[in-house]
Image (cartoon, helix red, strand yellow):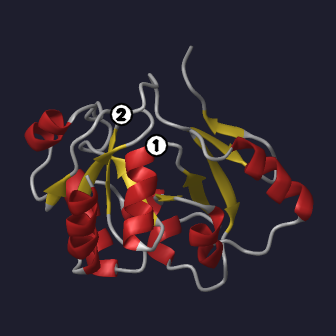
Amino acid sequence: MSWQLRHAARIVHNGGIIAYPTEAVYGIGCLPNDYLAVERLLAIKQRDINKGLILIAADFNQLAPYVDELSKSIYRKIEKSWPGPITWLLPKAEHTPPWLCGKHDKIAVRVTAHPIAAALCRSCGSALVSTSANIDSRAPARNSLSVRRKLAGIDKIIHGKTGGLAQPSTIIDALSDKVIRAKKT
């Protein structure tokens, strides 16, 4: 697996788009600061830039450059849920690229519990844009074959099993505790 991750990291650092398993579905991603890669990812998904994107990471340090300073109580709250399938909306740092947040004043971030996705972030030395591998508003891919069938233009697919969750991550606004997207039961 390590050679696949090193190869994927080279692709990402050269502006590529990769697909990989996450906790529930396959995700597609790229480097967050690479506008051309993000623009290409959005075109592949047919997703509006104003919706914003999620960043995943192996640890909070990879997310810190994109997040404004947090109070200790907010940090403790999010830290208890990570790594795991909880995506938090946090105040964005002043220099966070606008294409990551869309029309929103917060950024969506998660420390992933999926071993392949976390290892990929470590190999890249960076957080990654992570959005479900599908055309916007259609069912997400749950395996590598489905990614290949559903999406054209992916530069590398990392094969592996998803984490087995039935639904994508729950999204919670950390300041208000409002649940934006919940797992369906």
Secondary structure at numbered mark 1: loop
Q: Residue at x 67, y 78 (%)?
A: 93
Q: Amino acid at mark 2?
A: Thr
State how far apart marks 2 and 1 are (Cα): 8 Å
Q: Amino acid at mark 1?
A: His
Q: Quadrant of residue 154?
A: bottom left
Mark 1 closeness class: few <14, some 14–19, many ≥20 residues within 10 Å: many
Q: Residue at x 58, y 53 (%)?
A: 111
86 up-or-down from 164: above or below: below
95 up-or-down from 38: above or below: below
Q: Which residue is mark 1?
A: 114
Image coords of residue 40 (percent x, y): 22, 68
Q: Quadrant of residue 13?
A: bottom left
183 up-or-down from 150: above or below: above
Residue 162: assigned label: 2
Image coords of residue 169 (percent x, y): 53, 37
- Of 154 and 125, the residue lying toward us: 125
Residue 183 seen by the camera = yes
Secondary structure at numbered mark 2: loop
Q: Is residue 37 left or right of residue 99?
A: left
Task: Give whichever of discs 2 and 1 has the lower sequence position.
Answer: 1
Q: Is residue 151 left or right of residue 30?
A: left
Image coords of residue 165 (percent x, y): 46, 25
- Of 25 and 42, the residue lying toward us: 25
Do the CB atoms of the residues marked 2 and 1 lie less than 8 Å apart? yes
Residue 165: assigned label: none
Quarter of the picture holding the C terminus: top right
- Of 53 and 115, the residue lying toward us: 115
